[in-house]
Image (spheres, coloured by chain):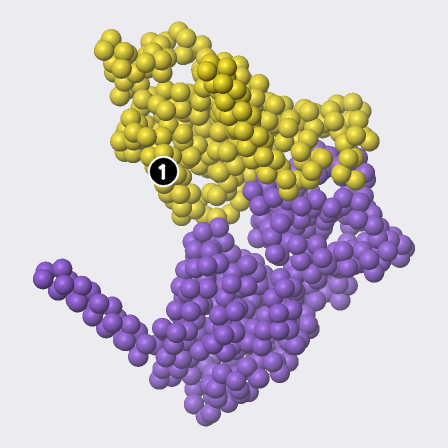
Amino acid sequence: MKIKNIIITFVSAIAILFSTSVVSLAKVVGDKIILGAAISLTGKYSSNGVHTQNGYNMAVDRINSMGGVKVGGKTYMFDIIYYDDESNPKRAAQLAERLISQDGVEFMLGPYSSGLTKAIAPVTEKYGVPMVEANGASRSLFTKGYKYLFAVLAPANLYLDVAIRTAVELNGGKGVRIAQAFEQDAFSQDVRLGILDAAKETGSKIIIDDKLPKELNDMAATLAKVKATKPDVLVVSGHTKGALTAIRQIAEMKVDVPMLAMTHCDAAKLSKQHGANSQYALCASQWHKTLTYKDDFFTDGMTYDADFTKEFGYAPPYQAAESSAALLVFKDAFERAGSFDQKKVRDALAATNMQTFYGNIKFAEGGQNVDKPMVLFQVMCDDAGKCENKVVAPLKWASAELIHPIPKWSDR
Amino acid sequence: MDFLIFQVPMLTVQAVLDGLLLGILFALIAYGMALQWGVMNIINIAQGDLVILGGYIAYFMYLYGIHPAWGVIVSPIIMYFVGVIIYKLVINKVVDRDLFISILATFGISILFMQLMNFAFGADVVLANSGYGTTMLFDNSVTLPNSKIFSAFISIVFAIGLVIYMKKSKLGRAIRATAQNARAAKILGVDTEKVYAATFGINAALCGVAGALISITFTIHPYMGLPYTIRSFMIVIVAGLGNLPGVAMSGMGLGVFEEFADYILGTEFRIGSVFLLLVLILVYRRFKLSKKREYLK
């Protein structure tokens, strides 16, 4: 009897909890537009997860304080429900279900990383929930025919494309010899595909093509091969681990290559952790504060950088900037749609054509942003050992001239 | 292209030297595992996580302006107490139980440590710079980072120190006695509880030294412990319990094996090849054992 009572109490408590949450949290409550996001606040992506969340929050505060979103003559404020996906794709998919079917969220913001976005996209697609994401660049996200997925960032295969083309240009238009090492994850392998395409188009040759394991912390073998074969370009992509390990061991093994191109340099705080050893590394970036894009909310990159640093106590990596841009896209789409109908908002998103402080945004059929090229910066250090990232390509935004070839270790 | 190593002879020298230096470091971690496995019959899945925690101690010293090499002294001292505390809280409850229970318990500790480190230190990959420079051999065609040489040297010093300690000191003798026969040792007045705590502490201290060396040589990250656990498990399996020269040899052998696997099969199969070797050795042992039995029949 006693057990029966406990079970009844338990079941009714859960039922009450569910019913209240569904009633209290619909898509638009009063003057609030509630967006949902599953973000990695713990687990291995937690640092970038926090950058993403800070980027979202910064934009929400800014848009709300500057008059909010005007839909159908009424003003609305943004609000976000966050859940921690623990850097786990399965958990992220569960949370997306929960946000949509229990919390009643009708518009979503993306999580951090391609892997987690891949886990969530089928869920948002199933429910027809428009999702603007800012941190999933894997090409495979945009080839599945998703209709409700929009990414403000350039796809992964374009990350280091510029580096290869620049190397070929500096080589008098002749193909170059490329050594590459990529981690075995969706993102890095897409960067690799981009390099393969660029190599094919420019007549370049891949002479080393290593795949790095997830638990990578030693690439001495790859670098010894690079030393022996003397390629024109060395390309490394393996998130922050790859960037840090490569720079440490290139310096220790005194590997001389004319050009070193990488991803995740600013997330790895390369110049802080390695100082002058990281000098001359070329890094792919979605955004840099010196780019001259403008908008009404954050003015430009420099202002965004200053405001973000003031608010959160550290300079914004591109992961934060692109996350802020996602909110600007949503605001613009809501206002153009003039309604909260998911189909209308989706169509408005698809027709987006705007400039933000982060770059131009215009979505292709697959949902990727095709109007914003990647930039390359080079780590440059002064004699005192203070290092700075300076944009060197594309030429339109270059704030410094590319140093090429990299001076030999014996001359440094 | 995969067989570049056979076209450029200097790469073979590089691979062997890199492998040996790396292997000595692995052997130190495996040494700790062999010790507590032999004495307490516990397979410590959290071994690699203790290593990473030791690495963070050296990293924080580096962050506060102390040279990370001092980590090889500070880290084992702190880690000894961490080890003793883990023993008092968890291990002493599973020490006489089934091996499976101890694997589960240390697996739990491993997950807990990963999450706590992630919570406390963040998910960023970090490293400590020693600024030790590089040794060039054979007209600059073979390069050895001095940090790797330093790591191997310190590992050897600690390993020899421990061998002497185990032979000469009272606690060392008590540990060896307990390993041979815990019940008999108890009857003869050895406080086995204390011996177990000290053994686990010594193991954690060795992990602390190795961790400090890894933060100087490679990178550390809260979730990077497992490969170190697997490698030390592998080394102990090959060498057998209580066979210290065997641990050193099999450690170095594994280091060289990994380097060659990297050159020949590709970096992506590096850890995979360690697993494959482990399976092969276990199958071989089983095969040998079954033959022996037949003979006895």
Q: Residue at x 50, y 78 (%)?
A: A128
Q: Quadrant location of residue A291?
A: bottom right
Q: Residue at x 48, y 70 (%)?
A: A123
- Give above or below for B171 relative to B73: above
| A176 relative position to B249: left or right | right
**Which quadrant of the rendered structure holds the N terminus of chain A?**
bottom left
**Which quadrant of the rendered structure holds the C terminus of chain A?**
top right
Q: Residue furthest bottom?
A: A73
Q: Position of residue A215 (x, y in %)?
A: 56, 42
Q: Position of residue A274 (x, y in %)?
A: 61, 41
Give the residue at mark 1.
B104
Q: Residues within 10 Å of mark 1 (few under 14, many from 20)?
A: some
Q: Position of residue B49 (x, y in %)?
A: 44, 36
Q: Colour of chain A?
A: purple
- Give above or below for A140 relative to A26: above
Q: Nearer the viewer, residue A172 or B38?
A: B38
Q: Residue at x 86, y 53 (%)?
A: A175
What secondary structure is found at the residue carrying circle 1?
Answer: helix
| A302 relative position to B64: left or right | right
| A361 relative position to B72: left or right | right
Q: Amino acid at mark 1?
A: Leu
Q: Residue at x 59, y 70 (%)?
A: A151
Answer yes or no: is residue A396 visible.
yes
Count of numbered badges drawn on the protein: 1
Q: Residue furthest left?
A: A1
Q: Nearer the viewer, residue A210 or A381?
A: A210
Q: Quadrant location of residue A277?
A: top right
Q: Position of residue B56 (x, y in %)?
A: 46, 37
Answer yes or no: is residue A386 visible.
no
Q: Colour of chain B?
A: yellow
Q: Residue furthest front?
A: B297
